[in-house]
Amino acid sequence: MIKIIGIMAATPEGIIGKEHALPWYYPEELDYFRHLTQGSLMVMGRKTFEATPPDLFKDHPPLVFSRNHPLKRLPNHLAFSSLEDFLSWCPSSPHKEMFMIGGAEIAHLFLRENVISEFLLTKIHKSYSGDTTLDLTFFETWEKKILTSNLTYTTLKLQNPKETLI
Ligand SMILES: NC(=O)c1ccc[n+]([C@@H]2O[C@H](COP(=O)([O-])OP(=O)(O)OC[C@H]3O[C@@H](n4cnc5c(N)ncnc54)[C@H](OP(=O)(O)O)[C@@H]3O)[C@@H](O)[C@H]2O)c1
């Protein structure tokens, strides 16, 4: 059994990305992300993989969802062409938990199929324009706990009220 924890940052409107990058630059929020995910297994969509600095994956090969793109950037990664493919691989992993780091396509797939038990969501206070949106309505029934808050953003821990699939 692996616990899957989502970790992403979004504006009040759910904007998470712009032109293959984050629409904002908050170094402290990036440190928070790195601190929590350091040493852990991470699963993501191909576009997020390509937008992420490779040093983030120095501890474990990244788990990347892609239907058809050859992933050349890192020799050491695992690619999955479907959720079924990924779910059948999971029991072979010795890990007890992993982080789902985005982007929206993979987050929506995991949320729709109810495989995420907990979500660490950073709510950016300011609105930014962008081209990629996380559908925040998924969390309407999730229990919310504020972890930290400052002038720029609030970090939340959201708990899935339903039993997850894995
Ligand atoms: N704010 C945040 O916390 C945060 C976090 C992560 C990313 N982002 C931003 O979000 C944007 C990228 O997000 P995105 O939603 O466009 O892309 P994404 O989820 O990172 O990746 C999408 C890709 O995943 C693959 N994929 C999707 N569904 C699949 C399935 N069912 N089976 C197998 N593969 C599947 C496809 O890859 P192929 O095309 O290779 O088939 C698809 O093109 C960027 O701007 C990034 O900077 C923000």
Image (spheres, rainbow, N blue to C red):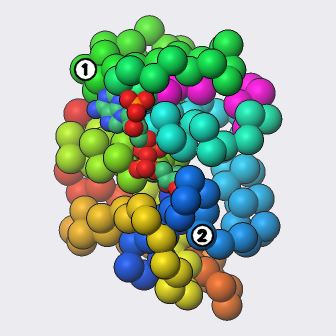
- Quick one: label 1, few (<14), some, or many (20+) residues within 10 Å? few
Is 73 situated above or below 17? above
Depth check, front residue: 147 or 115? 115
In the image, taking residue 97 as reference, residue 28 lies left or right, namely right
Which span of residues is magenta-colored?
56-64
Q: Nearer the viewer, mark 1 or mark 2?
A: 2
- Of the two numbered discs 1 and 2 on the same chain, state the one appearing first in sequence: 2
Q: Quadrant of ligand 1?
A: top left
Q: Is residue 101 left or right of residue 55?
A: left
**As drawn, is 154 to the left or to the right of 34?**
left
Residue denoted by label 1 = 84
Q: Residue at x 53, y 64 (%)?
A: 18
Q: Is 113 or 164 nearer to us in this picture?
A: 113
Identify the residue at horizontal 43%, vertical 65% (top origin). Answer: 131
Q: Which mark is residue 23?
A: 2
Q: Amino acid at mark 1?
A: Glu
Spot occupied by residue 72 in the image (x, y as percentages of width and height): 63, 18
Q: Residue 22 appears at what percent x and percent y? A: 60, 62
Q: Give the quadrant of residue 29.
A: bottom right
Above or below, 161 against 153 in this view is above
